[in-house]
Amino acid sequence: MQSRSELPLPDDSALAHSRRVVDLVRARLAASGGWISFADYMDLVLYAPGLGYYSAGAQKFGAAGDFVTAPGLGSIFARCLARVAGDTLEQMGGGVVLEVGGGTGALAADLLQALRTRPPQRYLLLELSADLRERQRARLAAQVPELLDRVQWLDRLPDRPLTGVLIANEVLDALPVERFTMQAGKPRQLGVGLSGEELAWSAADASAALEAEVRTIEQDLGARLPDGYSSEVSLRQPAWFGALAATLGRGLALFIDYGYSRREYYHPQRTGGTLGCHYRHHWHADPFFLPGLQDITAWVDFSAAARAATAAGLDVAAYTTQAHFLLATGILQEMEAVTEASPARTQAMAAELRQLLMPGEMGERFRLLALTRDFVPAGELTMRDMRPGL
Ligand SMILES: C[S@@+](CC[C@H](N)C(=O)[O-])C[C@H]1O[C@@H](n2cnc3c(N)ncnc32)[C@H](O)[C@@H]1O
């Protein structure tokens, strides 16, 4: 992780934008007695309309942005998901694909291109950001114009349950989390206040929900968390999975993200938690650096996610590493198909595969959680079943 002084500074207009975001946080602090929870802070700086990191026009994705996600590396990741989605829809006799948080539109475009001989009835994109919607529309119009009329943008989940495949790549890590630190055997809630003129961490008594969740974690671990131990919990996951579960009438939901099962997440040696920020390809731990200009994220507790999903009536069909998911769903065959058709791409494909599969890259720290309702996939989703560790 890097310190503030090592990070590059933005231009004047970006700095002015960040100051407007800080003013918004200050106004919220003033209206809330000088303290807001960290999840509320994340909500503001990431999603406030027109101002938040994901809602405003910053570049975000790719080499000129802050981070790269799997769909930005090339088309192979999308082609594997297309295989799973296509087979699932065929097995169910048709249905739709719903992608949550579509980023640049690369996944949607590459997936639809791979499915052009057996496209879904509709491709729904749940996208909160007006800026990203426009980028997605442009990408799809350029790459799969013949399928554009099947694409529909949503700003909230559909009212009626759907049959099909739901995909959320790197969305769970963007859900606002609460942060806590243990003190005298009890969790203290780390929220946000002012230190002089600056936004800063501010500790308060933990909310009842946060305290209960920390006690559940301790029960699961069979040990108390020691004083000084700090980490995060996602108190919003149960409601979020509840809403998603109501949307999935029948079919398969795929969540891919960096994360751990609970025992790894709250490992005694991980004393500082997993919260981090992406800013121009630097990874650092200061969520108060240039609010609105950087991504803030926490790793996913997949045990909690699976628990929330099963409480909402879904079944856990698979939990595994990204590498074992992609190998089971045909990444090597897809690579062969691409390099046979265009041998000049062999080197680039090898690099893409390395990033997606190697343990030191995305292969091991990214996980797949596959959930189903009223559906049993005919094909394998993994070569390594990690569900017992959840
Ligand atoms: C790290 S980006 C990943 C984007 C894309 N899936 C990819 O792989 O490149 C996180 C995305 O999740 C979206 N997101 C976060 N919370 C969301 C929510 N509650 N509903 C829908 N999208 C959400 C953000 O707007 C953003 O597009």
Image (cartoon, rainbow, N blue to C red):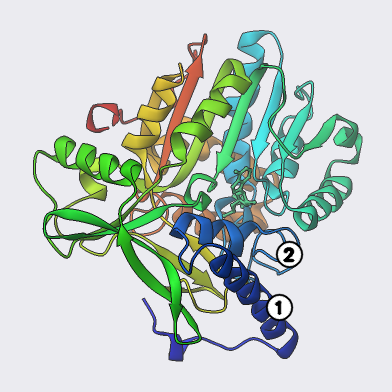
Place of residue 380 in the rendered image (x, y in percent of width and height, measured from the top left): 44, 22
Place of residue 55 in the rendered image (x, y in percent of width and height, measured from the top left): 71, 59
Identify the residue at the far left of this view. 223
Q: Which mark is residue 56?
A: 2
What is the quadrant of the C terminus in the image? top left
Q: How crowded is mark 1: few (under 14 residues within 10 Å), some or many (20 or more)?
A: some
**Vertical placement of residue 175 versus 284, above or below:** above
Confirm whether residue 254 shows in the render.
yes
Q: Residue at x 54, y 22 (%)?
A: 245
Q: Is residue 146 left or right of residue 124?
A: right
Q: Is residue 9 left or right of residue 321?
A: right
Confirm whether residue 286 shows in the render.
no
Distance in Å between CA atoms under marks 2 and 1: 10 Å
Q: CB at mark 2 closer than 8 A to ligand 1?
A: no
**Considering only order in the chain, which callout, 1 or 2, is on the residue closer to the N terminus?**
1
Place of residue 375 in the rendered image (x, y in percent of width and height, measured from the top left): 52, 11
Q: What element carries label 1?
A: helix
**Vertical placement of residue 62 versus 144, above or below:** below
* The one of 71 and 46 positioned closer to us in this rendering: 46
* Residue type indicated by callout 2: Ala
* The one of 23 and 259 positioned closer to us in this rendering: 23
Q: Residue 105 carries which label?
A: none
Q: Name the residue under label 1.
A: 17
Place of residue 108 in the rendered image (x, y in percent of width and height, measured from the top left): 72, 41
Q: Residue at x 69, y 27 (%)?
A: 97
